[in-house]
């Protein structure tokens, strides 16, 4: 009789068959939700016209500045402070990443 191979760790075990069954379950659930969808979509009708944030768009080219206007207005004070730190040099961002990662590792190890 063939025995299933299980990798036992301190946190439990890992079995490929369980992961395959879980993936198939998710696929069945996804197709079930998709299958209950509405069938009223028709190509070539006004249903294909752009619809952004509850409004029909005459000009379908909407920039991110217009789409996120409310968010940027609400966060303007924070964004202005962050803009002062923005240098545009990739080395600066990599350095900040290393520093922040070091702080996080120190917090996790303490």
Image: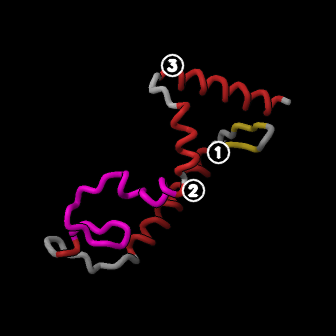
Residues at marks 1 and 2 touching, judged by CB atoms closer than 8 Å: no
Name the residue tied to disc 1. 15
User: Regarding mark 3 in the picture, which secondary structure is present there?
Assistant: helix
Residue 55 percent across, percent down from the top left:
31, 72
Q: Is residue 1 visible?
A: no
How is the protein colored in the picture? secondary structure
Residue 21 percent across, percent down from the top left:
56, 56
Nearer the observer, disc 1 or disc 2?
2
- Mark 3 to mark 2 CA distance (whole Å): 42 Å
User: Regarding mark 1 in the picture, which secondary structure is present there?
Assistant: loop
Task: Tell whether position 64 is magenta.
Answer: yes
| Disc with the residue nearer the chain's start (3 vs 1) | 1
Question: Which image quarter: residue 110?
Answer: top right
Does residue 101 lie above or below 58 as drawn? Answer: above
- Mark 3 to mark 1 CA distance (whole Å): 42 Å
Name the residue tied to disc 2. 22
Q: Nearer the viewer, residue 106 or 87?
A: 87
Residue at image position (25%, 67%) is: 57
Nearer the observer, disc 3 or disc 1?
3
Circle number at residue 7: none
Name the residue tied to disc 3. 91
Residue 82 percent across, percent down from the top left:
56, 38
User: Regarding mark 2 in the picture, which secondary structure is present there?
Assistant: helix
């Amino acid at each position: 009789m063939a025995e299933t191979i299980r990798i036992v760790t301190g946190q439990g075990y890992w079995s490929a068959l369980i992961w395959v069954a879980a993936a198939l379950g998710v696929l069945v659930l996804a197709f079930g939700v998709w299958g209950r969808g509405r069938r009223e979509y028709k190509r070539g009708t006004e249903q294909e016209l752009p619809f952004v944030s509850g409004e029909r768009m005459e000009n379908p080219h909407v920039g991110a500045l217009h789409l996120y206007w409310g968010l940027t207005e609400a966060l303007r004070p924070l964004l202005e402070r962050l803009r002062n730190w923005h240098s545009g040099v990739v080395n600066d961002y990599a350095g900040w990443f290393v520093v922040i990662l070091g702080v996080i590792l120190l917090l996790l190890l303490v």
